[in-house]
């Protein structure tokens, strides 16, 4: 068994152990979940150190035929695009488990679902067979449905149902496209991503357009692309904070990752849809930023800001050049850290004050200085302040767009200004002014909470000051993808 299989199946083994553990032993359940999540993160770290960033091809590949008749295979591999996402999935899953100590009911089911979700997310980024990719894609729906529907807020049932219906609707379009394209690869039944990208050159232009349209819809729901974003605000607001960390930090990136693979596989169709994608990116940045600026609910603000930040990812992908696609991958990683940190801190603040209304707070810097420091750094990263990973990612995406569309990129500066406006407003309302009476005894971050927040905010700052290792990680693979889509 290779290292990728060990990485993939470690959280699944943990989930199986939880299934046979008595629900009365809460301490044992938490210990098993934390142990297997930490072990998964350790394996991901080892994989990251062994990964050769100078190679563009798949590494640590594993391949076993599952069904010769349809060409499906157990095919795993990582490259410069999937490696950052694999590491982020393991890291954020560990962080989500660290702050899950507030869950008091249904502990066994909760931790089982979290480990199963980690298994599904890792499978999406490791799978190199489209059939296997689709299976893992659907696997993530099951635990998320229960995590939101059982442990969420007052509107949790509507949020979980909304999420599943949207995602399953998008999955139908994705499945139709994958079934349509599979007939063109006789050797492997159209299932392997590498061989499939070669076989698509035998397609007609019309077929490429229809297939990519189906994939854009399928991946666009999860990303989400406007106007397929309807599930996101409610799901983010109602989900428990640890689940929101994974939902924003990793689940949204699954859509962007799939879309990046799809455009490299269907270059003619990618060129055709390029103007539409950049328009959708502009709408997402401005629309998401405006709605985030209007929110008084802190969690809703972060949810809408995710739409705006994922618009930057879509901009980088739509540029179809090396700089832009590098920016897309960087923004996927940057937003993973930023959104996860924001949902963590907002969730911890809500647990202490039982309100998410930004108008209820004032001058928390005097009461909770550690919380104020981490929150301010995260909000500065969200607005793309130099010295944070958010700045590095947005700069690459915007530079890639400028190479493609020139002065039209001035329109995208509106999205950046909106990010700055709601970030500065939030800092002002939370941490300035007189201390309100009901906020005088809010507890500051504890040791475990400091550790979790420190990991996420540390990643934001370290990768902002020293971004070259992150850029180099995907550089060779991005160059290869560019050769596939360049006219």
Image: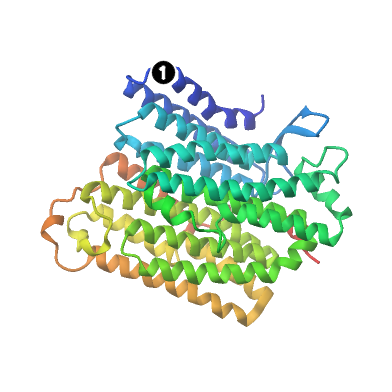
Residue for badge 1: 21
Q: Quadrant of the C terminus?
A: bottom right
Residue 272 is situated, as x and y percent measured from the top left of the image, at 75, 67
Total marks shown come to: 1
Lateral position of residue 255 relative to residue 235, left or right: right
Quadrant in which residue 204 is drawn: bottom right
In this rendering, is residue 277 above or below 409?
A: above
Residue 122 is situated, as x and y percent measured from the top left of the image, at 58, 38
Q: Quadrant of the N terminus?
A: top right
Q: How is the image coloured?
A: rainbow
Lateral position of residue 254 relative to residue 266, left or right: left
Q: Residue furthest bottom?
A: 407
Question: Regarding mark 1 in the picture, which secondary structure is present there?
Answer: loop
Q: Is residue 74 visible?
A: yes
Which residue is located at x 35 percent, y 37 percent? 100
Lateral position of residue 23 relative to residue 220, left or right: left
In this rendering, is residue 185 above or below 343?
A: above
* Residue sitting nearer the eye, 243 or 82: 243
Which residue is located at x 60 percent, y 49 percent? 169
Q: Residue furthest left?
A: 437
Disc 1: CA contacts within 10 A as few (<14), some (14-19) or many (>=20): some
Residue 279 is situated, as x and y percent measured from the top left of the image, at 61, 72
Which residue is located at x 34 percent, y 42 percent? 451
Residue 284 is situated, as x and y percent measured from the top left of the image, at 53, 67
Q: Is residue 458 visible?
A: no
* Residue sitting nearer the eye, 190 or 172: 172
* Residue sitting nearer the eye, 187 or 427: 187
Which residue is located at x 42 percent, y 24 percent? 32
């Amino acid at each position: 068994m290779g290292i990728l299989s060990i990485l993939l199946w470690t959280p699944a083994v943990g989930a199986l152990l939880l299934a046979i553990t008595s629900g009365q032993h809460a301490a044992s359940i938490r210990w098993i979940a934390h142990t297997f999540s930490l072990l998964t993160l350790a394996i991901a770290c080892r994989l990251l150190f062994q990964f050769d960033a100078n190679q563009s091809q798949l590494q640590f590949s594993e391949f076993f035929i599952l069904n010769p008749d349809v060409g499906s295979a157990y095919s795993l591999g990582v490259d410069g695009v999937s490696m950052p996402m694999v590491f982020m999935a393991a890291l954020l899953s560990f962080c989500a488990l660290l702050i899950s100590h507030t869950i008091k009911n249904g502990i066994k089911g909760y931790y089982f679902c979290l480990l199963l979700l980690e298994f599904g997310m890792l499978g999406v980024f490791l799978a190199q067979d489209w059939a296997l990719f689709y299976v893992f894609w659907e696997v993530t729906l099951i635990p998320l449905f229960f995590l939101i529907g059982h442990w969420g807020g007052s509107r949790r049932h509507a949020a979980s149902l909304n999420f599943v219906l949207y995602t399953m609707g998008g999955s139908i379009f994705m499945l139709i496209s994958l079934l349509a394209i599979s007939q063109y690869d006789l050797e492997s039944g159209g299932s392997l991503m590498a061989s499939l990208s070669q076989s698509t050159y035998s397609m007609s232009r019309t077929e490429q357009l229809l297939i990519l349209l189906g994939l854009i819809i399928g991946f666009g729901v999860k990303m989400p692309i406007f106007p397929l974003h309807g599930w996101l605000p409610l799901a983010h607001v109602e989900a428990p904070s640890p689940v929101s960390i994974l939902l924003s930090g990793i689940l949204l990136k699954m859509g962007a990752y799939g879309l990046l693979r799809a455009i490299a596989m269907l270059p003619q169709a990618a060129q055709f849809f390029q103007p539409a994608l950049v328009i959708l990116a502009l709408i997402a940045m401005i629309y998401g930023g405006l709605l985030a600026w209007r929110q008084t609910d802190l969690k809703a603000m972060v949810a809408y800001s995710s739409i705006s930040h994922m618009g930057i990812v879509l901009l980088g992908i739509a540029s179809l050049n090396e700089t832009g696609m590098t920016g897309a991958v960087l923004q996927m990683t940057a937003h993973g850290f930023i959104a996860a940190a924001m949902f963590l801190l907002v969730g911890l603040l809500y647990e202490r004050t039982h309100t998410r209304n930004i108008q209820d707070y004032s001058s928390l810097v005097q009461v909770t200085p550690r919380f104020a420091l981490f929150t301010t750094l995260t909000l500065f990263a969200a607005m793309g302040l130099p010295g944070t990973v958010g700045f590095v990612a947005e700069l690459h995406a915007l530079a890639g767009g400028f190479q493609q569309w020139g002065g039209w990129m001035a329109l995208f500066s509106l999205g950046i200004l909106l990010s700055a406006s709601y970030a500065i407003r939030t800092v002002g309302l939370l941490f300035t002014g007189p201390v309100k009476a009901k906020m005088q005894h809010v507890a500051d971050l504890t040791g475990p909470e400091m550790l979790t927040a420190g990991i996420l905010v540390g990643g934001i700052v370290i990768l902002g000051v020293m971004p070259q290792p992150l850029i180099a990680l995907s550089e060779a693979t991005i160059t290869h993808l560019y050769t596939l889509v360049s006219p």
